């Protein structure tokens, strides 16, 4: 595809967006040109780490932890909508603003810890896709790692054709995950009364349930997509005045609600599938992806197990692709330089290759990666709130005082829960909790 056709492809989307802003397109047709960034970001909320946490929660405590998923998803909607708004209001992404307004030493430090977070995320996502390929096609894990690396690199090359092709492919993979869990829902036949009740009524039982709730909420807002979302919106549809900024932001908020809502439904379905299949049948010790696959086969049949792995493969490939995109935004924003996509893909897959070559337990690796993410998470959330509350930076889209307060409470809750998760992961007893 030539550069001219690339321009045409993106110009069509921009022209459709301008028509929507001017009121010439209405309803869903008006929203359609703005759909893309939030769906790309939403992939991080359906990555292999979510599979492990949701399945363990459902298998141990049935439907009773569903409310945690709902609360976590509402938090995610707020943070991601703020990140998208930052890009629309300023024309810059969050790392770029950090570089502009913080001392160089601070920016470099933030870059290092953020790169660690992106690499930790990519490790978990890469291993998820690798494990799915291994279980689906019975190929060696090391070969599956290399295949995952090649496929995700090919997906990343779509960026050269404009923003639309990659957005459509990512949205397609999200659709695969959603359809897979629709099939799983039909096969698992959950108790809908229990699903509705426990989605809105909080419950916490023994210490294990509290720590699982901490795990679900603490790992909800992913550091790398807080950075990435602002980068996806910063120059996608450039507003020409304050009125257009407001209009674009309204469409963006709608897209965030839809995309994150779908991600939330998928996470709910992961948990209630585990509840209706594993918990109901007495298999309460299902705590990792491999065991879930092996247990699904005799309980629901090979079709259900295969669909589960297909969804995991789509999750791993899409989230790993998005993780690499986020790494590029982080590097370019904080320190002002980039490396070729192929080189970044090779560098970020090295940890996964080492883990597989050494035969390290993927589930244990996933836990370690979540600890790294927990350490880094406060950085993007706090800096996002700091910039979004400043009128001199945000202009007409500055956060309202109530929004800032709510976001600050969310940041405090997530930070405290992540600290508790780290403390527990390092072997400390959960404070103030009984057995």
Image (spheres, rainbow, N blue to C red):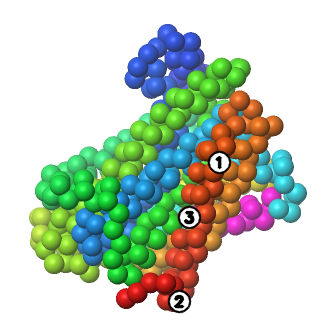
Circle 1 residue: 404
Q: Residues within 10 Å of mark 2 (few under 14, many from 20)?
A: few
Residue numbers of the magenta segment: 107-119
- Asked if residue 215 can be seen in this view, the reply is yes
> Picture coordinates of residue 150 (x, y %)?
48, 56
Asked where in the image residue 409 lies, by quadrant, the reply is bottom right
**Does 344 lie within the magenta span?**
no
Task: Give the spatial CA distance, label 3 vs label 2.
Answer: 20 Å
Asked where in the image residue 433 lies, by quadrant, the reply is bottom left
Given residues 138 and 394, the one toward you in this image is 394
The correct choice, above or below, for 84 with respect to 426 in the image is above
Mark 3 or mark 1: whose residue is earlier in sequence: 1
Mark 2 or mark 1: whose residue is earlier in sequence: 1
Q: Residues within 10 Å of mark 3 (few under 14, many from 20)?
A: some
The correct choice, above or below, for 393 with respect to 106 in the image is above
- Number of the label disc, if any, that sits on residue 28: none
Given residues 125 and 53, the one toward you in this image is 53
**Does 115 lie within the magenta span?**
yes
* Residue displayed at 56% across by 64% down: 413
Circle 1 — which element? Answer: helix
Q: Quadrant of the C terminus?
A: bottom left
> Picture coordinates of residue 311 (x, y %)?
31, 55
* Residue displayed at 88% across by 57% down: 103
Circle 2 residue: 428
Circle 3 residue: 413
Task: Give the spatial CA distance, label 2 vs label 1.
Answer: 33 Å
- Asked if residue 359 can be seen in this view, the reply is no
Q: Furthest-top residue in view?
A: 24
Frontmost of labels 3 and 2 is: 3
Mark 3 or mark 2: whose residue is earlier in sequence: 3
Residues under numbered marks 2 and 1 in contact, where contact means CB atoms less than 8 Å apart:
no
């Amino acid at each position: 595809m030539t550069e001219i056709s690339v321009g045409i492809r993106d110009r069509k989307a921009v022209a459709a967006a301008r028509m929507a802003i001017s009121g010439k397109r209405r309803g869903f047709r008006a929203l359609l040109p703005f759909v893309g960034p939030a769906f790309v970001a939403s992939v991080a909320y359906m990555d292999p780490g979510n599979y492990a946490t949701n399945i363990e929660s459902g298998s141990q405590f049935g439907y009773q932890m569903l409310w945690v998923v709902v609360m976590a998803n509402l938090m995610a909607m707020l943070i991601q909508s703020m990140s998208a708004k930052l890009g629309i209001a300023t024309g810059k992404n969050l790392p770029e603003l950090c570089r502009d307004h913080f001392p160089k030493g601070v920016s470099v430090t933030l870059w290092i810890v953020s790169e660690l977070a992106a690499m930790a995320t990519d490790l978990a996502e890469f291993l998820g896709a690798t494990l799915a390929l291994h279980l689906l096609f019975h190929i060696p894990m090391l070969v599956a790692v290399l295949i995952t690396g090649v496929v995700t690199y090919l997906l990343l090359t779509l960026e050269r054709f404009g923003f639309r092709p990659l957005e459509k492919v990512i949205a397609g993979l999200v659709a695969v995950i959603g359809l897979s869990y629709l099939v799983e829902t039909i096969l698992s036949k959950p108790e809908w009364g229990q699903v509705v009740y426990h989605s809105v009524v909080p419950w916490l039982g023994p210490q294990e349930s509290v720590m699982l709730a901490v795990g679900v909420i603490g790992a909800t807002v992913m550091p790398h997509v807080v950075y990435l979302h602002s980068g996806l919106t910063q120059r996608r549809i450039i507003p020409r005045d304050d009125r257009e900024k407001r209009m674009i932001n309204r469409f963006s908020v709608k897209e965030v609600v839809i995309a994150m809502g779908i991600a939330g439904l998928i996470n709910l379905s992961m948990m209630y599938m585990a509840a209706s299949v594993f918990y109901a049948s007495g298999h309460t010790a299902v705590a990792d992806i491999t065991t879930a696959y092996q247990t699904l086969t005799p309980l629901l049949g090979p079709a259900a197990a295969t669909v589960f792995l297909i969804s995991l493969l789509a999750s791993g490939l899409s989230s790993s692709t998005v993780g690499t995109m986020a790494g590029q935004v982080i590097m370019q924003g904080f320190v002002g330089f980039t490396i070729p996509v192929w080189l970044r893909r090779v560098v970020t897959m090295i940890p996964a290759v080492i883990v597989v070559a050494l035969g390290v337990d993927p589930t244990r690796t996933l836990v370690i990666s979540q600890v790294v993410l927990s350490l880094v998470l406060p950085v993007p959330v706090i800096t996002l709130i700091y910039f979004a509350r400043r009128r001199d930076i945000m202009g007409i889209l500055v956060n309202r005082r109530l929004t800032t307060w709510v976001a600050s409470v969310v940041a405090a809750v997530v930070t405290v829960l992540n600290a508790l998760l780290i403390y527990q992961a390092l072997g400390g007893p959960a404070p103030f909790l009984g057995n």
